[in-house]
Image: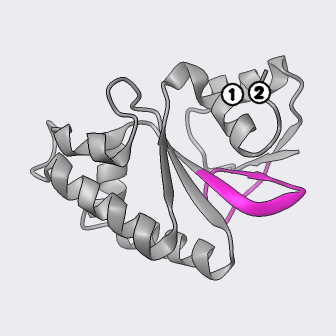
Amino acid sequence: MIICDTREQKNQRILQYFETHDIPYVERKLDTGDYMDSEKMDVTIDRKQNLGELLRNMCSSDKSRFWREIRRSKEEGIKFIILCEHGGQYKTIRDVANYKSQYSRISGRELMERMYAAHIAYGVEFLFCDKRSTGRRVAELLGKGGG
């Protein structure tokens, strides 16, 4: 069964995907990430709506909570996957170098460097998808199918 964090916002289409494909889920508070498998809690998926949200989480003055969550998952032996719904031209961390935020002075290159640092230091995996495929990707990543 997939556990969906109760604090996860705007995830109705993801839950609808689970319901449509008979993937059982329950909503409850998670300490790390937004989605986990209740039977094998060694992987967590943290969904980001776009690169702007990821930039705010990794680079803003309020980034400490996010980095604590990453460190906590590593300490607890939980693989931390960030699934960014930016999609389109963004398929790898390297592609993020071309990102330009209209709300921040932080460059795509700087964001890319922080992502690489999180990957190297904490094993964080960064994956990209479009919003239409998020439910399927979450189910696949947690080993729950996703047909």
Q: Residue at x 80, y 43 (%)?
A: 143
| Image-quadrant location for residue 41 | bottom right
Pick the quarter of the image with the C terminus.
Answer: top right
Residue at 34% across, 62% down: 116
Q: Do the residues bearing badges 1 and 2 touch, measured as CB atoms within 8 Å?
A: yes
Is residue 30 magenta-colored? Answer: yes
Q: Is residue 56 magenta?
A: no
**Within the image, what quadrant is residue 12 found in?**
top right
Q: Which residues are magenta?
A: 27-45
Quick one: SS at disc 2?
A: loop
Whether residue 32 is visible to the viewer of this picture, yes or no, is no
Q: Is residue 140 left or right of residue 13?
A: right
Q: Which mark is residue 43?
A: none
Name the residue type under label 2: Gly
Outermost residue, left side: 105
Q: Residues within 10 Å of mark 2 (few under 14, many from 20)?
A: some
For this view, does 51 lie left or right of residue 6? left
Judge the density around disc 1: few (<14), some (14-19), many (≥20) Cα neighbours within 10 Å: some
Give the side of residue 126 with respect to residue 29, left or right.
left
Question: Horizontal and vertical percent for residue 54?
Answer: 36, 49
Tag of residue 136? 1
Residue to which mark 2 is pinned: 146
